[in-house]
């Protein structure tokens, strides 16, 4: 597992994950993000500019995505609102 650099957001909640580009996450980096998320359920990853397809691909690695019917969903990726 890759050790990711992070810092506390506040004393009792949240971590900022540093130096990660979600557009290109390999298995080792994803595992590191998952480990941080299991330890601290609020993660901040600043300055991420993902295409909808990349956002969906990254998000699916955490589990099944919910499609909210009758909402302003993205035409090609209904998981994105």
Image (cartoon, grey):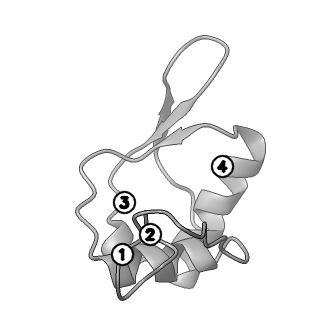
For label 2, the SS is loop
Disc 2 crowd, CA 10 A, few/some/many (<14, 14-19, 20+):
some
Mark 2 = which residue? 80
Mark 3 = which residue? 20
Where is residue 9 shown, x and y percent of the image?
Answer: 49, 22
Would you place residue 11 above or below residue 77 in this image? above
Would you place residue 12 above or below residue 70 in this image? above
Front residue (pair 17, 54) = 54
Residue located farthest toward the right when viewing the structure as drawn: 38
Which of the 4 image quarters holds residue 2?
A: bottom right
Q: In the image, 40: left or right of 28?
A: right
Which of the 4 image quarters holds residue 73?
A: bottom left
Would you place residue 29 above or below residue 34 in this image? below
| Disc 1 to disc 2, C-alpha distance | 6 Å
| Residue in view at x 69 percent, y 40 percent | 41
Mark 1 = which residue? 74
For marks 4 and 1 on the same chain, the one whose residue lies earlier in the sequence:
4
| Disc 4 to disc 3, C-alpha distance | 13 Å
Quadrant of the image containing the N terminus: bottom right
Q: Do the CB atoms of the residues marked 1 and 2 lie less than 8 Å apart? A: yes
For marks 3 and 1 on the same chain, the one whose residue lies earlier in the sequence:
3
| Residue in view at x 24 percent, y 49 percent | 47
Where is residue 63 shown, x and y percent of the image?
Answer: 73, 75
Q: Do the CB atoms of the residues marked 4 and 1 lie less than 8 Å apart? A: no
Front residue (pair 9, 4) = 9
Residue 24 is at least partly visible in this image: no
Mark 4 = which residue? 36
For marks 4 and 3 on the same chain, the one whose residue lies earlier in the sequence:
3
Disc 1 crowd, CA 10 A, few/some/many (<14, 14-19, 20+):
few
Residue 13 is at least partly visible in this image: yes
């Amino acid at each position: 597992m890759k050790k990711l650099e992070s810092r506390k957001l506040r004393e009792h909640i949240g971590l900022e994950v540093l130096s990660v580009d979600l557009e290109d996450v390999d298995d080792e980096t994803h595992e590191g993000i998952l480990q941080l998320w299991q330890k601290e359920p609020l993660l901040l990853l600043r300055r991420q500019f993902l295409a909808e397809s990349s956002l969906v691909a990254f998000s699916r690695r955490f589990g099944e995505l919910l499609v909210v019917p009758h909402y302003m969903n993205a035409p090609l990726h209904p998981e994105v609102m």
